Structures are given as structure tokens and as C-alpha cells.
Image (spheres, rainbow, N blue to C red):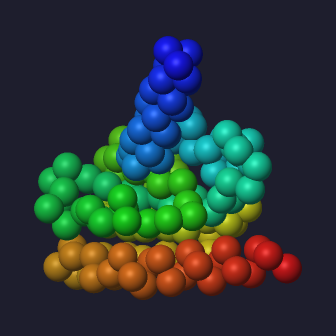
Amino acid sequence: MKNYVKKISVTLLLCICYHSYAQQEFWITDSLFDTTINNNDSFEDGAPDIIVVEFWTEWNSKNAFDDWKKLTGVRYYRMDFESSQETAKKYGVRRAPHIIIFKDGYVEEEYKVDLSFKLSVTVEKVQKRINELLEASKF
């Protein structure tokens, strides 16, 4: 019985850790960008090959995409816009926040701030696009 309780406790702890890991925000830099976007390795079979990157900046953090934790079926990363100029230039990012959805390393969708530096896209709209990309992957 003692062994059984120990196994259940360890399993429960692993589940909690996995859930926390899945909800974390990960920061990447210019030097990690290509590897991150093009890396198809995953921790489990069938893990999403869709990556969402938000170019973020401290001075406009009040307009950041804070609903990213609600997204499912993707890996989510943030880049500091001011210190990631090489990648920002490569993808034509001129203001932040700016969201790019990648699938298999290719840009599938972008959401940009308006002239008032506000990102008007909703989490529902982003998730809808992610779901379309996931559905298209099934074929």
C-alpha cells in the first residue's frame, strides 16, 4: 500500500509539473530564434508543430498579448523587440506587440498593433487560426 501511495504521489507531481511547464512563457533571442522555430523535436509524439512568437517591449507591456496562456495546441514564445532587432528586421516587425504564427518554420499569420500601439486581436481569433492550421495538418 505504501508503494502504491508513493507511485500515485509521484504521478500527481509529474502531472502538476507538466501542466505548469505547458503554461510557461518562454523567452527567445535572435541567437535562438531559427533553432526554436525550425526545431521539430518535441517531448511527446504528436506535439504541436505550430509556434506563436510575440515580439514584446517593456515600454508597451500594457498592450502585450496577455491571453497567451489560453492558447492550446501551440508552443508560445516571447522576444524582446528592442534586443532582437535582427529577427525583427527579418520579419518586418516595426512595432510591438506583434504576433507571428509559424507552422513548420513558415509564417502562417501575423497580428500587428495599430497606430496607437494596441493589439486588437482577440485570443478567440488567434485560437481559431491555430485550430485551422491544426486541422489542415491532419491531411
44 or 122: nearer the viewer: 44
**Could one spot residue 105 in this view of the protein?**
no
Q: Please, which residue is most extreme toward the front here?
A: 1
Dividing the picture into quadrants, the one containing residue 101 is bottom right
Q: Residue at 47% of width from left, 77% of height from top?
A: 127
**Whole-percent x, y for residue 82 in the image:** 32, 47
**Whole-percent x, y for residue 46 in the image:** 74, 56
Q: Residue at 76% of width from left, 49% of height from top?
A: 45
Dividing the picture into quadrants, the one containing residue 104 is bottom right
Relative to 77, does residue 5 appear above or below in the rendering? above
Relative to 15, does residue 120 appear above or below in the rendering? below
Residue 90 falls left or right of residue 82: right
98 or 2: nearer the viewer: 2
The quarter in which the C terminus is drawn is bottom right
Q: Please, which residue is most extreme toward the top here?
A: 2
**Could one spot residue 23 in this view of the protein?**
yes
Q: Residue at 41% of width from left, 59% of height from top?
A: 54
Residue 24 falls left or right of residue 37: left
**Whole-percent x, y for residue 125 in the image:** 42, 84
